[in-house]
Amino acid sequence: MSLKITGVETVLLRVPLKQRTITDSQSSVTDVEFLQVVLRTEGGLTGYGMNWSYTPGLKAAQVALDQNYAPLLMGADAVQRRELVRQMFFSNHFIGRVGATRVAIAAVEFALWDLACKAVNLPLWKMLGPARTRVKAYSTDGGWLSWSTDELVRDATRLVERGFDAVKLKLGLPDPLEDLARIAAVRKAVGPKVQIMTDVNCAWTLATARRIAPRLAEHDVTWLEEPMMPEDVRSHAVLQRAISTPLAVGETLYTLQSFRDYIAEGACTFVQADATKLLGIDEWLQVAALAAAWNLPVVPHTNVQQKLHVQLAAATPNALMVENCYESLNEMWVEPIYVRDGHYSLPQEPGCGLQIRDEVIRDHRIG
């Protein structure tokens, strides 16, 4: 079957959340942008990729894809995935190698993987070789800063009743002592057996982190995520040496080399690689292997499309669990997956599973 690329299409969407506005220390989210990429081939197979953003701006990725990458892809053999990614990457030399340009490459890389999986009639996790047949989930859906303490407790309790034994709370309020009080309330409500993770979304200074983070141990917090700006590896290393609570990073790291620097400096314990921020699946697998070489666990960062990272986690021995968030968006996907008894189901259809339903594209297309 020929996988010569005969068509490259992009669609830009803005999809509203079917839930109340959510807030962390950096942003309030009412809708999410998506860039759908469609690769058509001479043999009749179609590959789907996508990327996403909480805030407007994916138009830049769409322009990079339409103007820079599509001409490179047309007529190429989709089997040459790594070479095509290399060509796309180096075409960005003068316009930037991270951010929107990399987000666009990842969307294409997913579509190339989708074609490879469909060519052999396997879902991604089986194509990679499974390490497990169930993937544990943890939930962020009840831990937002826009929730009152009572609402945090209510939602954490509800999630535990659903089968989750791990929940994440957002930190970064103007008064960090209020953050601590909210953690204490949730811990009291869910008991000692439920894992509690915390996420600052880069809002703290090192001074604040050194004052507040040591107290997380009082509540048996599993990790402290992104306490400071992601570019500041040194401050994370200083903090990790000063506290017993493990640090987690990765949501805003875009390169294999960034993860190398964090790991080599002892600046993190949990590696939260996100394939949608990296160059795609291949680079994600490189980060996971790097973490394994340092005996560190991987917990993929994922919010709007768990299906991709669930499959990667299923094929990665040192992957512990996958985030579950924005469940109100599940139905926008063809063949969505769900959490049952605290675990994700694994998809059975061939491919990566990143196709957005036609009616969603019809109703929410913006470009």
Image: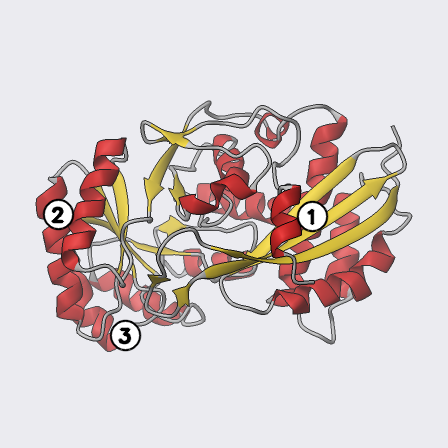
Say which element carries label 1: helix
Q: Residues within 10 Å of mark 2 (few under 14, many from 20)?
A: many
Q: Is residue 298 found left or right of 63 in the rendered image?
A: left
Vertical relation: 9 (above or below) 297: below
Q: Earlier in the sequence, mark 3 or mark 1?
A: 1
Say which element carries label 2: helix
Q: Is residue 266 found left or right of 10 in the rendered image?
A: left
Foreground of the two, 161 or 252: 161
Give me the C-alpha separation between circle 1 and circle 2.
41 Å
Circle 3 sits on which residue?
A: 206
Circle 2 sits on which residue?
A: 187
Q: Residues within 10 Å of mark 1 (few under 14, many from 20)?
A: many
Foreground of the two, 112 or 63: 63
Residue 263: x and y in percent read 42, 55
Residue 70: x and y in percent read 82, 57
Q: Quadrant of the N terminus?
A: top right
Residue 15's disc is: none
Q: Amino acid at mark 1?
A: Glu
Give me the C-alpha separation between circle 3 and circle 1.
37 Å
**Residue shown at 61% from the left, 30% from the top:** 128
Q: Residues within 10 Å of mark 3 (few under 14, many from 20)?
A: some
Residue 40: x and y in percent read 82, 42
Q: Is residue 362 found left or right of 316 in the rendered image?
A: right
Q: Are marks 1 and 2 in contact (CB under 8 Å)?
A: no
**Residue shown at 78% from the left, 52% from the top:** 9
Circle 1 sits on which residue?
A: 109
Q: Nearer the viewer, mark 2 or mark 3?
A: 2
Q: Amino acid at mark 3?
A: Leu
